[in-house]
Amino acid sequence: LIHLLSIEGLPRAVVEQILDTAGSFLSVNDREVKKVPLLRGKSVFNLFFENSTRTRTTFEIAAKRLSADVINLDIARSSTAKGETLLDTVANLSAMHADMFVVRHSESGAPHLIAQHCAPHVHVVNAGDGRHAHPTQGLLDMYTIRHFKKDFRNLTVAIVGDIVHSRVARSDIHALNILGVPEIRAVGPKTLVPGDLRDMGVRVCHDMAEGVKDADVIIMLRLQNERMNGGMLPSSGEFFKHFGLTPDKLALAKPDAIVMHPGPINRGVEIASEVADGKSSVILPQVTFGIAVRMAVMAILAGNEA
Ligand code: CP
């Protein structure tokens, strides 16, 4: 693996290697991540052309725990604002001896473009591109499911909300298929859950009760208003009434179901506070696991498996 641009097409063994390597970075209580010297002397450049709280920060923590030097390019103050192209920016950062680029961009395919043009020794990690892919989120979601459910066989996983605009949903669906999850449901209104998801082996549900019934895992997604063009946008009150995860809707899932969300959450839009803060929620453990999973990805790309 030279770059991580998408989960689609990854062999199951590679996905499992990433999850196992992440596990090796976590201590017994699955909270502490110890510092290791695997990327000492390497420079990791965080290039976030789109907003981020969790992904950017956990990539920085992960790179520092691997002993790399981390450079966070401040895009708003960079020469991008003066018209410099993406590839010229990357060429200049490469001249500063970058070893790895972690890239988030609103344009689907931007990390692929960088990977095609960067020097052969440089690794590119997709940190979310448009509505295409968010592979490290998909991997940390799989780590979370494995942690709480132990096994992917016999699971029913419901992904609920704005799936059409969601790079997380696409990465999760690819990963769940690779790991052999038998029932993957995409749940939401017709405008946000396209029928062609069935081609990915997904059961499409436009009714929330049907979608979450007997689920082991519920992954909630926010309305991605920034990727909607006017007409598709449901009112948040209307959306919450039909597809918001409330305690009564959660009660339809298995009693030990876990509730996940990639964040940022919009309380009262796709998820009720009682659920987000309740005992079934594993939303914050997802964030913690993200550090170890991103460490694993960077260590494996750099050829330094734990
Ligand atoms: N889940 C996720 O990608 O969150 P951020 O946009 O805050 O990085």
Image: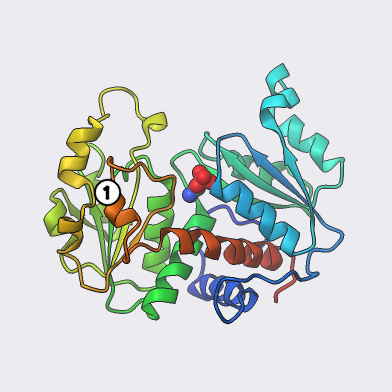
- Looking at the image, residue 180 sits to the left or right of residue 36; the answer is left
Relative to 276, residue 300 above or below: below
* Number of marks: 1
- Looking at the image, residue 105 sits to the left or right of residue 266; the answer is right
Image quarter in which the N terminus is found: bottom right
Q: Can residue 9 be seen in this view?
A: no
Query: Residue 27: x and y, percent?
Result: 61, 78
Q: Can residue 255 be seen in this view?
A: yes
Relative to 196, residue 277 above or below: below
Find the residue positioned furthest to the top: 82
Q: Residue at x 61, y 54 (%)?
A: 58
Q: On the image, which quarter does residue 163 sit in?
A: top left
Give the class, few, some or many, for how many residues have Cα within 10 Å of label 1's Cα (few <14, many ≥20): some
Query: Residue 14: x and y, percent?
Result: 56, 72
Q: On the image, which quarter does residue 213 sit in?
A: bottom left
Q: How is the image coloured?
A: rainbow
Query: Residue 52: x and y, percent?
Result: 55, 41
The residue indicated by pointer 1 is 272
Image quarter in which the C terminus is found: bottom right
Q: Which of 143 and 201 is in front in this view?
A: 143
Q: Which of 12 and 249 is in front in this view?
A: 249
Disc 1 within 8 angstroms of ligand 1 (CB): no
Q: What residue type is labelled 1?
A: Ala
Query: Residue 302: x and y, percent?
Result: 74, 64
Q: Residue at x 12, y 56 (%)?
A: 209
SS category of the residue bearing label 1: loop
Q: Which residue is drawn at 81% across and 69% down?
A: 37
